[in-house]
Image (cartoon, helix red, strand yellow):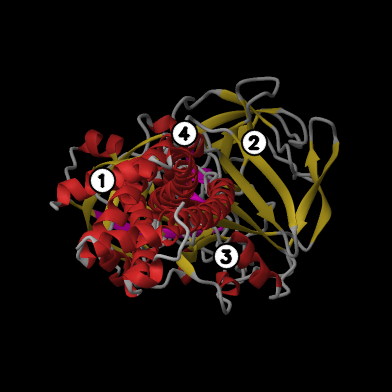
Amino acid sequence: MTGTRIIKNSIRQLWRMKGKAVLFFLLLLLASGLFSLGRSFWSINQEKTKAYENSFTTIGVVEQKPDTVRERKSWDAGIQDYRLYVGSVYSSYLPVSVLDFEGADYLSGPEKRVCYGAYMPEYEMHATRELATGLRYGFIIEASPVEDAVPDHPITIRVSKIWKGAGIREGDTIRLCDHYNPAPKMLYKDKTYVMAVYDVPGHESDLEFNPDPAIRSTQVGPDGKYLPDEVDEDYFYEEVTDDFWESERSRRWRNLMKVWDYGNHIFPVTGTSDIHLMMPFYNNEVAITSGRDFTEEEYENGEKVCIISEYFAGKYGFKLGDQIELPLLIADHYRSAGRMYGTSGGGAYNYLNAKGEPYEVFEDSLYTITGMYSGKFGLLTELGMGYNEIVIPANSVKNSDEDNMVDMGPMNSGTTSFQIENGTIEEYMEKWNRQGIDNVEITFYDKGYTELEANINHMSQISRILILAGAAMVLMVLGYFSWIFILRQRERTAIERSLGFRKSQSFLSLFSGIFLLMVLGSFGGCAGGGLLSEAVAGDMGQTVYYDTTFGNSAPVTTKTVIGENAEALDAAVPFQDMFLNVGIILAAGSAIAGTGIYMNLKQEPMKMFGSRKE
């Protein structure tokens, strides 16, 4: 008998038990669909996890909390009384090294970024000089009061000489008020005084000016304390005598004039070990639109490469691959460039050191432009990008800036950050809490990965349950009906063998019919499971932005921020595993059926005639 006739005969024999055959088909359809649904969910979760790992990063920003607060007071001539305010007090500034503890598996950082100021006189920071004339909007002038007076209220003075600044002329009278000095000194009309003054917005007159202790340095040491300065903090003006400008007393004023215009030529330069640790890049407020990021080798080796703004490049004709000289003059170890440098001004530092001399450049190098960025910058926010900010590898600064520090402060969200593996926030915080540092607050940003991970883990649990349930049901259905269709057909096998069937022909006779049902049931069930999983998977690609803030022991703030519409990640194709699922079911069914047939064929035909035929 040919194989085709044997298969047809097998199907006819199976059709004689069509009730059981239909039940077998339906149960296998359900079981394989359940198994396929679980397998499809598992595959989708795996694909989603890979996609999320490549699309999401988890950043922690660090802020040292004050040890206490102290009430401070500031004199206000407008109300002739002190204004009270609360200021933060730190016993010491924690180094960023406190974040380097055992088990902290950082992907990048931690780092506390320094904002350098590069003095580049050939370029202008702002479009007009009035936006940055050194210290606020101001002047260095010589003037005399029109009458003897104490400037504890607005008094009239006549300008006799303008050393720096534009907008008033020699011979003009202006209103002067030593607004924040509780005990200003008498000014005499027969004397001339040199002073630095700046306009005070919102006072009675647009031409009301305050004196500024501009010749007093704000240089700090590594401990954050001001270096000793011979000039008193309330020192605002100096009498100009006949020999004043040739005397040592004028040295600071002459030096102040040298650095007065520095503000419009100081460009913020930030050193980092990974630009994605900088929140403007992480939040996509700015992005590299030309060129590239630094390579790992450039970060590690401190190569002389930089990323500049498209605006700055366009203004001065820079192209990728060009070199730009960055003479680093000052270093701010407290505030970010985003906080200090805005589109309408900023970077108002004092450029005299504690000895009254202009700061000297502590490092001067040529940097190659590898990338350019564009986006939102210059908004004067702690987490923002500074106006015309230049980014360099932190390791590219080789020399010490100890003698050029204009400010020092605690770790804060604009300067201190790190990256950890996605989904490890709780694990990280458990290890951090064991360090016993109770005045540090860490805020994590992961663009919603934690919530997505929870959904994925939930679906993974469901998929495992479905796989196990489906597999168990498939095995039970295959086992039970193999017993019905094969083991209870021993008499049929005996007859076929007695009629001269070879063992291979008897095997084909028993196996082909049930195998056809297994093929139909498994394909139908797996296709249905794939369709169902595709419908469910559509709800698994939504993302939201959120951050979680942690203190010393437990989460203290959790909030969800809905950002711009995040692009949904493509779902995995649910049918990509359908043939594999069918193959698994058919392999299991073939093994079970084959084992039953083998047990039938092991027996002699005469011994099987006693078996009851169904």
Tell me the SS state at disc 2.
strand
Question: x%, y% of residue 468?
Answer: 53, 57
Residue named by callout 3? 220
Q: Nearer the viewer, mark 3 or mark 2?
A: 3
Q: Which amino acid does label 4 sit on?
A: Gly
* Towards the viewer: 451 or 64: 451
N-terminal-most mark, 3 or 2: 2
Tell me the SS state at disc 3.
loop
Question: Residue shown at 49%/25% (left/top)?
Answer: 168
Q: In which quarter of the image is residue 132?
A: top left
Question: x%, y% of residue 106?
Answer: 48, 68
For mark 4, does the 10 Å Cα neighbourhood hold few (<14), some (14 to 19), or many (20 or more) residues?
few
Residue 358 visible somewhere in the drawing = no
Q: Residue 210 carries which label?
A: 2
Q: Nearer the viewer, mark 1 or mark 2?
A: 1
- Real-space Cα distance between discs 4 and 3? 57 Å
Question: x%, y% of residue 135?
Answer: 51, 42
Left or right: residue 208 compared with residue 255: right
N-terminal-most mark, 1 or 4: 1
For mark 3, does the 10 Å Cα neighbourhood hold few (<14), some (14 to 19), or many (20 or more) residues?
many
* Towards the viewer: 296 or 542: 542
N-terminal-most mark, 4 or 2: 2
Q: What residue type is labelled 3?
A: Val
Question: Residue shown at 75%/64% (left/top)?
Answer: 553
